[in-house]
Image (cartoon, helix red, strand yellow):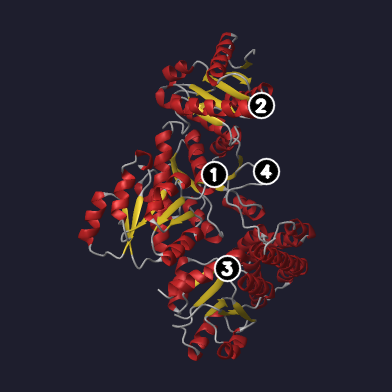
Amino acid sequence: MDKRQQQMADLQAHLQQLGEQFSQRLREELPQLADKALQLQACADPSEQLQRLTELRDHLHKLAGSAGTFGFSDLGARARLLEQQTQQWLSSLELQRQGLQGLVNELQQLASVEQVSQASVAPVLKTPSVGANRDGAYRVYILEDELKVGDVIRLTLNTFGYQASHFLTTAALDAALVEQLPDALIIDVNLGDSQQTGLDYAAALQQRLEHSLPLLVLTTQNDFYTQLQAARIGAMGFFSKPVDVAKLENRLERCFNQQSGEPYRVLIVDDDRELSSRYRLVLSGANMLVEVVNDPLQLFDAMARFHPEVLVLDVNMPGCSGPELAQVVRFNDDWLRVPIIYLSAETDIALQMSVLIRAGDDFVTKPISDNSLIATVFARAQRARLLSNALSRDSLTGLLKHADIKEQVAIEQERALRSGKPASVVMLDIDHFKKVNDTHGHAVGDNVIRALANLLRQRLRRVDSLGRYGGEEFMAVLPDCNGEQAVSILDEIRQQFSSISFAGEQSDFHVSLSAGIASSHERTADELMEMADRALYAAKNNGRNQVRLADD
Amino acid sequence: MPDLKRILHVEDDPSIQAVAKVALEAVGGFTVLSCSCGQDALDQVEGFAPDFILLDVMMPGMDGPQTLQELGRMVDITQIPVAFMTAKVQPNEIEHYRSLGARDVIIKPFDPMQLATQIRAIWSQSRG
C-alpha cells in the first residue's frame, strides 16, 4: 500500500468511527424525540404546544441534515418529511389531534432500536444510489381517485416487473411516503371532490423532498395551461385519459434510464494545462467522465480510445486552431454524432458565427462560469446520446434493428465458442397478430408490439441483447444461459404477456406469443438462428402460445 | 492570489462538526478551526485569519445569517468567501443567502469525500 492509499484507508476508518458515534447518538436521541412528541400531545396550553412544536421541528431539521451525511439517507428523508409536516402545522397553527397521534406513532417507530441498527449497517460513505432498489424492482406510487383506473395501471405495471401501489387519496399516499419513498410517482390531476388538484399536491410534495421524484401526470384536461403547469413542477410525462398503459410504461422506463444511465463522456482539448484540469474538475463534479488532451496531435488517439460523446475544443492553440481541428474531426463519419463545443475569449458574434459555419455546434465564452460550462456540455451530451440511440434503434420499440441484433448474435456466439459456456438464441412471434391489426387497427397493434418489447426488456438481463427482427417478430440472444434456463425464462414471459389486458376498439382483449429457442456453444451463429426459427415454426404448428427448444 | 488553506467552520452539531473537520483536513489538506456557535466564531475569527468561512444556518442563539452580519463588521467578507451549509433550501432562499453576502450554499446532507472539492469550487469561482 503506498502512502496515498494508506491515508485514504485511515480516513475511511476515521469516518467509519465517526459514523458509529453518530449511530450511538441516534440511539439516545430518537427516543428523546419520540418523548418530545408525546409531551406535545399531552400538553393543553396552546402557547406551550407552539413552543414544543417549534423545538420538535428544529430537532427534525437537524436530523434531516445530518443523518444522510453519515449514510442514514432513509432516516434523513423521513425526518425531512416529518419536519415539513410540523412546519405546516406551525404555519397554520392547527394542531389536529388525529394527525398528532400519527406523528407520535411515526416518531416512536423512528426511535425503535431496529431502525438504528438496520441503518448502521450502511457504510458511512455510501452515497444514495439513484434509482436502485433493494429488491431490484422499481417502486411506483399511483395517486388516482378512480378505483378501476388506478387498479388497471397498478396491475399492468406489476406485470412489467414494477412494484406498483395505488392510492385513492392524498392522505393515504402521504402515509405511504413516510414509510417508504418510491422511485417514481404517477399522479392524476383531477382528484374528485378534494380541494387540491393533483398538480398542487405534487408541487408541494416535490418541495418537501430532498431529491425530486420522477413524476408522470394523468389528466382529462389536455389543455396547454395544464401541460405548462405540469412542466413547471418537473413532470417527465403527460398522459390523457383513457391512459395507454404501455406508453406510460415506456416513459417510466425512459425516466429510469436517464436517471441511472452511464455518465456522459467528455473529451477536452486545450493546451492550457491549468485551465483544462479546472474544467475537468468542474465537469467531473457534475458526474461526467472527462479526459483531457493538451496536445491537439493526440486527439485521434484519444477519440479512438475514449469514445467521447462531446468534444470540447479551445479555439486558440499553437500549431492547430480549434476550428481547424473540428473540420478534421468532421472528415470522419464515425464521429458525426459527437457535438463540438468551442471555448473561446472571442466575443465578436460575427467571428463566432463564421467559425460555427465551418464546423462545430456551440460556443462558450471565456471567462467561463462553472455553471454555464456544465449546462452547455450536459445539454449537448444529453441530446447527442438521445439521437445516437434513436439512430441505431427501432423507433417503435427502442430495440436493436434487424442487422444490429444479428451482429449481436454473432458476437455472443463467438464469446460462447471461446468460453465454452452456451449462448441461447430466441426467436419469438406474436400469435395471430394480423387479426389484432384487422380488428382493432394498426395503432392498437403497435401498442401490443411495444408492450411485448417493454416486457422483454424488463424481464431479460442487462447482458442479454434484444432486437425487433421483423414486423411482429423478435430475436434475443442470452449469453451464458443453457436451453433449459432459457425455456423457463421465456415461458414465464409467455404467461405474463398473455395476462396483459389491451384496450381495443370495442372491448379489452388478450394476446399470446410463441417462441423457439436454440442453445449451443459449438454451432455457428447462422446455424443457431436457423434452429431457433425451426423451433418457432414447430411451436406455431403445434397450437401456438408455447415455447419450444430446438433438438440439437 | 492567496491560496485556500484555512477554513473557519461554524456548526453547533458536534457530529457534523467532526466529520467536516476530518473530511476537509484529510481530503482537502486544509487547516480547519471548528466553532460551536456564532459568538465563538466572532471571538476567534481575527486570530485565526481564515481564507474561507463555512456557516451552518440554523444554530441556537445567533443563527448563520446573524453571524455572517456580525462577521462582516470585523473582517472583509468580500475577500474571505463565506458559504452557508443547510438542509434542503428553495431556490429563492439561495438567492436570499447570496444577497446577505454568501457565495454559495452547500446542501446537507453532504458527501464527506466531496466536501473539499465543493469548497474549492466555490473558492475558485469567487476568485473569478
The front one of A489 and B20 is: B20
Please identify the quarter of the rendering in which residue A501 is found.
Answer: top right
What is the three-letter code of the residue carrying label 2?
Gly
Q: Secondary structure at mark 3?
A: helix
Residue A2 x %, y %: 67, 62
Q: Nearer the viewer, mark 2 or mark 1?
A: 2
- Other residues around mark 4 within 10 Å, as few (<14) / some (14–19) / many (≥20): few
- Measure how far apart labels 4 and 3 are at the Cα level: 31 Å
Q: Which residue lies under the disc numbered 3? A: B115
Q: Which residue lies under the disc numbered 4? A: A135
Q: Secondary structure at mark 2?
A: loop
What's the residue at 59%, 18% (across, down)? A523
Q: Which residue lies under the disc numbered 1? A: A145
Question: Considering only vertical position in the picture, is A438 above or below B46?
Answer: above
Q: Which mark is residue A326?
A: none
Q: Confirm whether circles 1 and 4 share one chain.
A: yes
